Image: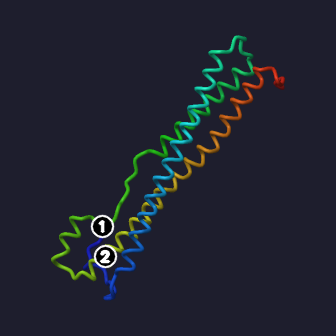
Amino acid sequence: MTSPESRRFPQTEPTLAYDVAKARLAMRFAQIDSLDTKVATLLGFGSSLLVILGAFLALNEEPLSRASVALFIVAAAIYVLLAAASLYAYSPRKWEAGPKLDELWGYAEQYAPVVLGWWAAESFKTCCKNVEDQMTPKLLAARLGVFLIAIEASLLVAGLVVQADLVSPPW
């Protein structure tokens, strides 16, 4: 963030711009928290499906058909992709949360409160843009997770249906 002296700010009160920019950044961080919760839910659901499959296999007295085994293996591979997408969504990112306090403290003796207010508002605005840019890969990983969980569930159901002899596989 550049110093207040390198910018020309309006001499009007910065309160509205400051409050809006700060609230927008807080909203972005709340969206990130919500997205993290959704990713965790998807991973938990995918894990639960595999646990249910494990219980079925443990309680099943009949030998598994090759078709069921193939479907279960593909479902497990899809789960690995889901776990990788979740890990990517959770991977560390460099979040910025507004003006650095040390800088603000240092500028407090040099600049008028109006200039500092505009400088802080601009800092929140810049941080909000950076957070939005870094949210995009996290959002794409979450969308991929939704797609993968649907495939995993479908494969597991198909494997169970085939194993129960409710339908004959085409191969």
* Nearer-the-camera pick, 3 or 155: 155
Disc 2 to disc 1, how far (Cα)? 8 Å
* Nearer-the-camera pick, 59 or 72: 59
Colouring used for the render:
rainbow
Amino acid tagged 1: Pro
Question: Where on the picture, by quarter, is residue 126?
Answer: bottom left
> Where 8 sits versus 30, above or below?
below
**Image quarter of the N terminus:** bottom left
> Where 63 sits versus 148, above or below?
above
Label 2 residue SS: helix
User: In the rendered image, which residue does mark 1 sit on?
Assistant: 99
User: In the rendered image, which residue does mark 2 sit on?
Assistant: 119
User: Which residue appears at 51% of the width and 42% of the height?
Assistant: 40
**Image quarter of the C terminus:** top right
User: Which residue appears at 36% of the width and 74% of the height?
Assistant: 122
> Where 2 sits versus 56, above or below?
below
Label 1 residue SS: loop
**Percent x, y for residue 64?**
71, 15
Question: Where on the picture, by quarter, is residue 43?
Answer: top right
Amino acid tagged 2: Trp
Name of the residue lying farthest toward the left: 109
Pointer 1 local density, CA inside 10 Å: few below 14, some 14–19, many at least 20: some
* Nearer-the-camera pick, 5 or 80: 80
**Percent x, y for residue 50?**
60, 28
**Percent x, y for residue 56?**
65, 20
Question: Viewed as shown, does residue 95 lie left or right of 117?
Answer: right
Pointer 2 local density, CA inside 10 Å: few below 14, some 14–19, many at least 20: many
**Percent x, y for residue 16?**
39, 80
User: Which residue appears at 29% of the width and 72% of the height?
Assistant: 2
User: Which residue appears at 30% of the width and 67% of the height?
Assistant: 99
Choose the circle earlier in sequence order: 2 or 1: 1
- Label pair 2/1, CB-CB below 8 angstroms: yes
